[in-house]
Image (tube, rainbow, N blue to C red):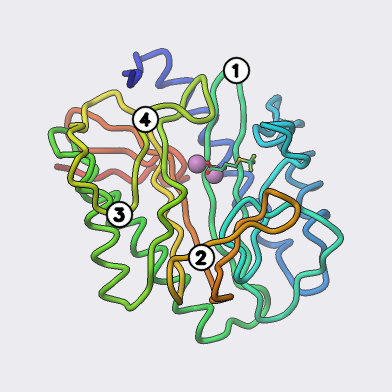
């Protein structure tokens, strides 16, 4: 069942999504060569707690930390550790906040120090794919249009889309229906409607789309060791288009 949010729920989602976005903006200046991912975790954790919220990942299905940090060929769900980030790395930081009973979810891939050409390429394609998905996430449009649009753009750029993980409805639960695929699935009959709130979060690989899991049972990596990047927003479908709840400028798309 897809939960259509009422005005009160939308107001609460605005607040938690804003906090998630603020956390992501806050951490940016700390992303520099020589810091550990645990340090980034701890700063985000304290920031979220000090704003009256809790980090959703912590203890979620046994996840041990408060944010996800995924470096280079790591696709997603990297666990913060003593690992030091280095000049030329790319790192996705995924923040989910739980505030007044509602989750807000956003992520971004940063370059560490000076960017490499490959890092920049995969970051740009991943960001373009998210924005392309947002641009077609409109009331009355088939949900599968989002995935078809993203996959087409990734392929045009000779990149691949990870199939095993998808965007998701979000609200009182971290992961709700619908599943928002980032590739074309012609069987999907869902129509996008006002009041839906879901994430779009394509994971884009420079090589092929095959994945594997690391021994920690969380971190997902590219099988061919190619770089992977991801950007994520939580969006609200409105009568006239959509609104990016995790964008601090309140980006709006008109149908
Ligand atoms: N934030 C991730 C998402 O976008 C989920 C992380 S689950 C965790 O859906 F357990 F790894 F934190
Ligand atoms: Co998400
Ligand atoms: Co996320």
Find disc 1 in the rendering and name its residue. 100
Q: Residue 142: x, y in percent?
A: 16, 39
Q: Earlier in the sequence, mark 4 or mark 2?
A: 4
167 shown above or below 10:
below
Asked if the residue at label 3 sits under 8 Å from ligand 2, the reply is no
Q: In the rendered structure, are the residues bearing label 2 and label 3 in contact, judged by CB atoms less than 8 Å apart?
A: no
Q: Earlier in the sequence, mark 2 or mark 3?
A: 3
Q: CA distance from mark 1 to mark 3?
A: 33 Å
Q: Residue 234: x, y in percent?
A: 43, 39
Numbered disc 4: secondary structure: strand
Q: Earlier in the sequence, mark 4 or mark 1?
A: 1
Q: Earlier in the sequence, mark 1 or mark 3?
A: 1
Disc 2 vs disc 3: which is toward the camera? 3
Find disc 4 in the rendering and name its residue. 197
Q: Nearer the viewer, residue 109 or 249?
A: 109
Q: In the rendered structure, are the residues bearing label 4 and label 2 in contact, judged by CB atoms less than 8 Å apart?
A: no
Res. 248 mark: none
Find disc 3 in the rendering and name its residue. 183
Q: Residue 169: x, y in percent?
A: 40, 31
Quick one: quadrant of the C terminus?
top left
Find disc 2 in the rendering and name its residue. 229
Q: CA distance from mark 2 to mark 3?
A: 16 Å
Q: CA distance from mark 4 to mark 1?
A: 17 Å
56 shown above or below 84:
above
Q: CA distance from mark 2 to mark 1?
A: 31 Å
Please indicate whether residue 119 sits to the left or right of residue 186 in the image.
right
Disc 4 vs disc 2: which is toward the camera? 2
Q: In the rendered structure, are the residues bearing label 1 and label 3 in contact, judged by CB atoms less than 8 Å apart?
A: no
Numbered disc 1: secondary structure: loop
96 shown above or below 238:
below
Mark 4 Cα-neighbour bin, 10 Å: few <14, some 14–19, many ≥20:
many
Mark 1 Cα-neighbour bin, 10 Å: few <14, some 14–19, many ≥20:
some
């Amino acid at each position: 069942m897809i939960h259509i949010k009422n005005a009160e729920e939308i107001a609460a989602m605005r607040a938690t999504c804003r906090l998630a976005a603020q956390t992501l903006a806050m951490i940016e200046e700390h992303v520099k060569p020589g810091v550990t991912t645990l340090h980034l975790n701890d700063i985000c954790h304290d920031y979220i707690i000090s704003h009256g919220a809790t980090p959703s990942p912590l203890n979620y299905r046994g996840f041990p930390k408060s944010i996800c940090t995924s470096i280079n060929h790591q696709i997603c769900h990297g666990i913060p550790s003593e690992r030091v980030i280095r000049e030329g790395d790319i790192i996705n930081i995924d923040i989910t906040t739980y505030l007044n009973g509602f989750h807000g979810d956003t992520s971004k891939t940063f370059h560490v120090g000076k960017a490499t050409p490959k890092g920049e390429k995969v970051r740009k394609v991943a960001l373009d794919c998210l924005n392309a998905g947002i641009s077609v996430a409109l009331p009355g449009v088939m949900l599968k249009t989002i995935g078809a649009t993203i996959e087409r753009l990734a392929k045009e750029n000779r990149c691949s889309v990870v199939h095993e993980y998808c965007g998701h409805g979000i609200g009182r639960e971290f992961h709700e229906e619908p599943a928002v695929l980032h590739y074309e699935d012609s069987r999907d009959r869902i129509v996008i409607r006002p009041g839906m709130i879901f994430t779009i979060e394509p994971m884009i690989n420079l090589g092929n789309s095959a994945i594997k899991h690391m021994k920690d049972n969380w971190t997902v990596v590219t099988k061919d060791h190619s770089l992977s990047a991801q950007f994520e927003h939580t969006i609200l479908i409105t009568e006239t288009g959509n609104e990016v709840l995790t964008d601090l400028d309140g980006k709006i798309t008109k149908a």
